[in-house]
Amino acid sequence: MLTELAIRKAKPTEKPQKPFDGSRLFLEVPPKENKRWRLKYRY
């Protein structure tokens, strides 16, 4: 589960990071862009 502190500490690195919250929601941290929330789903 992501906490507020873990979200604030997530910094861009060479490879994209995708820390999950425990279900389908995850925080995407690309190397040179801003953080953004993503939701995985099937259509």
Image: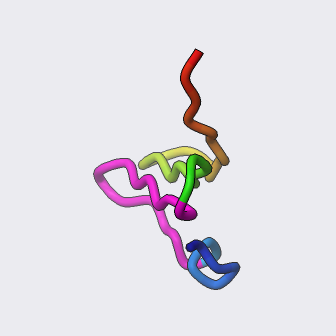
Is 29 colored magenta in this rendering? no
The answer to which of 21 and 30 lies nearer the viewer is 21
Q: Where is residue 19 in the image (x, y as percent from the top left)?
A: 47, 61
Q: Residue furthest top?
A: 43
Q: Which residue lies furthest to the bottom in this view?
A: 5
Q: Please report the residue visible at 47 percent of the width from the left and 46 percent of the height from the top.
A: 30
Q: Please report the residue visible at 62 percent of the width from the left and 41 percent of the height from the top.
A: 38
Q: Position of residue 6 (x, y in %)?
A: 57, 79
| Residues rendered magenta in the picture | 9-22
Is residue 29 left or right of 5 when viewed as pictured? left
Is residue 36 left or right of 32 when viewed as pictured? right
Q: Please report the residue visible at 66 percent of the width from the left and 47 percent of the height from the top.
A: 37
**Image quarter of the C terminus:** top right
Q: In this view, does 7 lie above or below 23?
A: below
The answer to which of 2 and 22 lies nearer the viewer is 22
**Image quarter of the N terminus:** bottom right
Q: In this view, does 4 lie above or below 41?
A: below
Predominant SS of the magenta segment: loop
Is 20 colored magenta in this rendering? yes
